[in-house]
Image (cartoon, rainbow, N blue to C red):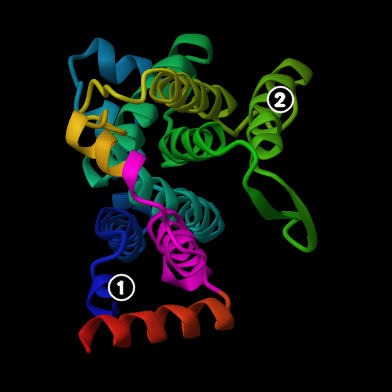
Amino acid sequence: MRESLKTQSPATKILVILNVAIFFFQWSLGPLADAWLIASFGLSRDGLSAGHYWQLLTHIFLHGNLLHLIVNMFALWFAGSAVESWIGSTKLVLIFLIGGICGGLLQVLLFPEGSLIGASGGVCSVLLTFTTLEPNLPITAFIFFVLPLQIKSKYLGYGILLISILLPILGLDPHVGHFAHLGGALFGFFYATYLRKFSSYSPFSPPLTPKKNPLQKAFDATWSPTPESRKINLILDKVLRFGFQSLSPEERKILEQWSRSQKN
């Protein structure tokens, strides 16, 4: 079990570390070099017109300030770890990158002025994948980053979509890439909806929920689980879906006792 924890959410960790490392590299350059970096690798309509298509990816890994980075990385760690445990590392990375690209394209299409930087589009894509795959999962949201409020995850998704639409319409926070948030969120929502509807098939990689073969069906029909095995199965399923840290002390004790019994 400890060994599995060390390798838990490897792609999420790599994405967070990469973003943090690039931010501190930006910070070390000084203002003039940082301005050149954003002009060269931030996303802009002028850049795309000049054939700088790498900006579609590179803008995702640049951030304007420490708060920008912290908010994005906190959200990526929160949702990315869960999504990666549910559908795999490859899908998580693709959702993050394609969501960032979709968000960037929508931003420069609807708001062509200036350069766009930040992982927000990719993060919103991962968040909406999370809230759409498990819409009724209870989570704790922090209002104004202070007040805790327990809600179902789908309401977080609705809130992200609503804010991303309303704020640019009302002209609030004009320097924030709201359409990038919206584009990424929409990709995450539609892709997760696709996975939920066609769970036996995924366009990115192997099936999310493979169909059982006849032998498995026969085994399920003849095997009657005991109350203890049902409890263990529920705990193991919780570990797979939300990680070992989601277990209560009692659940950890039950799992440890069961693990010892299997070795005897």
Q: Which residue is mark 1?
A: 5
Say above or below: 183 vs 154. Answer: above
Numbered disc 2: secondary structure = helix
Crowdedness of circle 2 by 10 Å Cα count: few (<14), some, many (20+)? Answer: few
| Residue 5 occupies quadrant | bottom left
Question: Which tag is nearer the camera, tag 1 or tag 2?
Answer: 1
- Predominant SS along the magenta part: helix
Which residue is nearer to you in this view: 191 or 169?
191
Q: Residues under labels 1 and 2: Cα distance?
A: 36 Å
Q: Secondary structure beneath disc 1?
A: helix
Residue at (26% x, 10% y) in the render: 49
Would residue 82 be visible to someone looking at this image?
A: yes
| Relative depth, front residue between 142 and 85 | 85
Residue type at mark 2? Answer: Leu
Residue 124, position as x, y percentages in the image: 50, 36
Residue 40 in view of the camera = no
Residue 30 located within the stretch drawn in magenta:
no
Q: Which residue is mark 2?
A: 162
Residue 194's image quarter? top left
| Numbered label attached to residue 237 | none
Which contiguous range is marked in magenta? 221-247
Q: Nearer the viewer, residue 259 or 178?
A: 259
Instruction: Give the quadrant of the N terminus.
Output: bottom left
The one nearer the camera, 180 or 49, is 180
> With respect to residue 221, does 56 lie above or below?
above
Q: Residues within 10 Å of mark 1 (few under 14, many from 20)?
A: few
Residue at x 39% of width, y 55% of height: 31
Is 51 left or right of 175, judged from the image as shown? Answer: left
Of labels 1 and 2, earlier in sequence is 1
